[in-house]
Image (cartoon, rainbow, N blue to C red):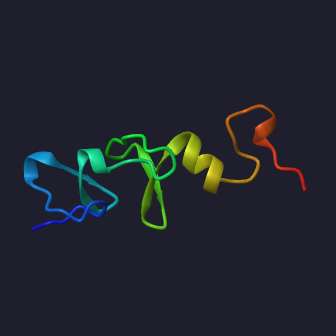
Amino acid sequence: MLKCPKCNKEVYFPKRVTSLGKNWHRPCLKCEKYGKTLTSGGHAKHEGKPYCNHPCYSAMFGPKAFGRGGAESHTFK
């Protein structure tokens, strides 16, 4: 039987969400930073963990000058 990568319990077909090449329980597929429930394909992964595309993944792992607009969009060194 397939196991959910988050809770390590069996995932049955009616409750399965496939994302990142794995099968998840719908409530287990959450953003690692904010805990927001994600939809299949509506997120990105980093080191095998799901993150919402905006703002988490973009702000944490995107180009340094990328952001949500405003002063926090730029990195000064």
71 sits left or right of 26 in the view: right
Q: Position of residue 50 (x, y in %)?
A: 43, 55
Q: Nearer the viewer, residue 57 or 34?
A: 34
Q: Residue 63 falls in which quadrant of the image?
A: bottom right
On the rendered image, what quadrant is the N terminus found in?
Answer: bottom left
Say whether residue 34 is left or right of residue 23. Answer: right
Between 7 and 64, the residue placed more toward the observer is 7
The residue located at (76%, 48%) in the rendering is 65
Q: In the current view of this chain or complex, which residue is farthest to the right?
A: 77
Place residue 70 in its image quadrant.
top right
Q: x%, y% of residue 73?
A: 76, 40
Q: Is residue 29 above or below residue 10?
A: above
Count how many numbered circles sit on residues in the image: 0
| Residue 55, above or below 76 | above
> Image point 31% across, 60% down: which residue?
6
| Up-down relation of residue 50 to residue 8 (above or below) | above
Identify the residue at image location x=23%, y=61%: 4
x, y (%) of residue 66? Answer: 71, 45
Q: Residue at x 43, y 45 (%)?
A: 35
Give how far across and how far down residue 49 sits, in percent.
43, 60
